[in-house]
Image (cartoon, rainbow, N blue to C red):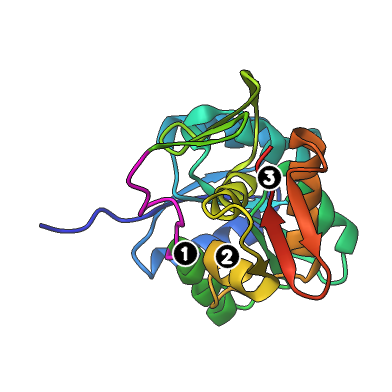
Amino acid sequence: METEAKKILIVDDEEDILEFVSYNLRKEGYQLFTAQNGRDAIRSAVEHLPHLILLDVMMPGMDGIETCREIRNIPELQSCIIAFFTARNEDYSLIAGLDAGADDYITKPIRPRVLVSKVAALLRRHNPLKTATDPVMVRGNIVIDTEKYLVFVGGREVFLPRKEFELLYLLASKPGRVFTRDEIFNRIWSDDVIVSDRTIDVHIRKIREKLGDEVIKTVKGVGYKFEQI
């Protein structure tokens, strides 16, 4: 039985970028869909449920940040990986993208071999939830449902983008245990994906904003641990 081709949605308002990226990824056997604006991207994502979305930051009308944020609010797309196309040295775009729920980024100008390698790495990322035997984890007043990607705090539902959810699950799986920064990167982003040092800090900050500062503690010079409330 043949394995179904991975589905990728490419979103960019520049026709030449769409053609360039599509050409290089089509040769690798991926099933591709394209969109040139945020609204069309959301409609295509809902229709096709891609495994990966490659999303340009700078687009007229609804930009990539807002598009990403809306996609992350759609339950059916919680497991989808989102990576931004961003110009070199645009740190503000990277941080804004991570805040909106993106998983990674690909730097422009895009080189074919780097593109193919990065896409392959993104699609084979380790999912720390796939080995979970019990779909529901209870930690004090926090309930984590790994099948529905839902988090409840004191009975109140709290939305977490996919990577925030996986990071919370990892830390909560062993309350009190300190996870080093390198261990977190390797478990959540995998050791074959290069991300900014600020990536983990952004995700931890966002989780604290939603669940409270006391949930995740920083162990200076080491990493982070989950404190059961």
- Three-letter amino acid code at disc 1? Arg
The reply to whether residue 24 is in sight is no
**Left or right of 5: which side holds 60?**
right
- Is 8 one of the magenta-colored residues? no
Which quadrant holds residue 83?
Answer: bottom right
The x, y position of residue 28, in whole percent, is: 38, 69
Q: Residue at x 63, y 41 (%)?
A: 161
Q: Residue at x 45, y 57 (%)?
A: 127
Residue 125 — which label?
1
- Three-letter amino acid code at disc 3? Gly
Quarter of the C terminus within the rendering: top right
The x, y position of residue 154, in whole percent, is: 65, 22
Instruction: Describe the element under mark 1 as helix, strand or loop.
Output: loop
Q: Nearer the viewer, residue 119 or 155?
A: 155
In terms of secondary structure, what is the magenta stretch mainly? loop
Q: Nearer the viewer, residue 139 or 82?
A: 139
**Magenta highlight range:** 124-134
The x, y position of residue 170, in whole percent, is: 55, 54
Q: Residues within 10 Å of mark 2 (few under 14, many from 20)?
A: many
Which quadrant holds residue 73?
Answer: top right
Alpha carbon separation for disc pair 3 and 2: 14 Å
Quarter of the N terminus within the rendering: bottom left
Q: Tag 3 or tag 1, which sits nearer the N-term?
A: 3
Does residue 199 lie above or below 7 as drawn? below
Q: Residue at x 75, y 62 (%)?
A: 199
Please name the residue that numbered disc 2 is placed on. 189
Q: Nearer the viewer, residue 117 or 224?
A: 224
Please name the residue that numbered disc 3 is placed on. 101
- Three-letter amino acid code at disc 2? Trp
